[in-house]
Image: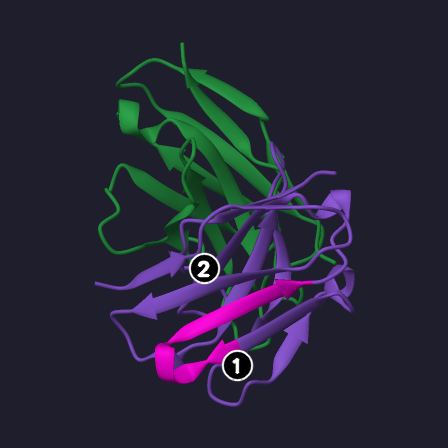
Chain colours: A purple, B green
Amino acid sequence: QIQLVQSGPEVKKPGESVKISCKASGYTFTQAGMQWLKQAQGKSLKWMGWINTNTGKTTYAADFTGRFVFSLETSASTAYLQITNLKNEDMATYFCASLSPHWFAYWGQGTLVTVSS
Amino acid sequence: DVVMTQTPVSLSVSLGGQVSISCRSSQSLVHNNGNTYLSWYLQKPGQSPQLLIYKVSNRFSGISDRFSGSGSGTDFTLKISRVEPDDLGVYYCGQGTQYPPTFGGGTKLELK
């Protein structure tokens, strides 16, 4: 069955970096782009952007340029989200999702990033 | 960006009852290709969202026919009939017609 498994929770200090992984299984990794979404505690979902798993081309939403980087390890069917120079407002749960460009059919379980000095 | 407005913010229901959630978009969600990319998700406490409905009225794999979606243009509705305990959580509508994809603020379904 199709699964997206994300890495575990992270606790970081402001200014540090974090790298979250999302390992896909049950389908051909390169057949669909990987999307990333952010959900702050008690808030709705915000789309961050996506990476084309065939070409590696990235597209970032306006609020997620500069400190956010999507990358791939195609041989491991894994996508990554790296956030540098962490700020308090980056504290949230981050989800990967895949298998359709127009809706979000399959989701990872989420990775909670806590930013605290 | 397309603004998605859901009402109500919260809803109390008795088990076995029926509820409707409304979702309105600030622009038409009809894509150039004729499809309308409006989807519905349920997020249970402590879990990731799960897709219920895509393209307005298509139930995702394994989703009960107690869930139905309807609407067109800018106005959409999710109906849940014969509510069960496992239906409780926060419901989100989302649009994938225009970039960036956006979501409503959520509707929390609770037991009366």
- Sort mark 2 into few (<14), some (14-19) or many (20+) by Cα contacts within 10 Å: many
Q: Which residues are magenta?
A: A72-83
**In the rendered view, would you say A23 is above or below B76?**
below
Q: Where does the image place residue B62, in percent across and percent down from the top left?
A: 22, 50
Chain containing mark 1: A
Residue in the image at 61% along x and 35% along y: A41
Q: Residue furthest top?
A: B112
Question: The residue tagged with tag 2: helix, strand or loop?
Answer: loop
Mark 2, residue position: A104
Residue in the image at 43% along x and 45% along y: B48
Q: Where does the image place residue A16, in percent across and percent down from the top left?
A: 72, 55
**In the rendered view, would you say B109 is above or below A13?**
above
Q: Quadrant of the C terminus of chain A?
A: top right
Q: Quadrant of the N terminus of chain A?
A: bottom left
Say if labels 2 and 1 share a chain: yes
Residue placed most toward the observer, A56 or A32? A56
Q: Where does the image place residue B88, in percent across and percent down from the top left?
A: 37, 26
Examine the structure image and report whether residue B90 is included in the region drawn in magenta: no
Q: Is residue B11 left or right of residue A42?
A: left
The residue type indicated by label 1 comes to Asn
Q: Is residue B14 left or right of residue A62?
A: left
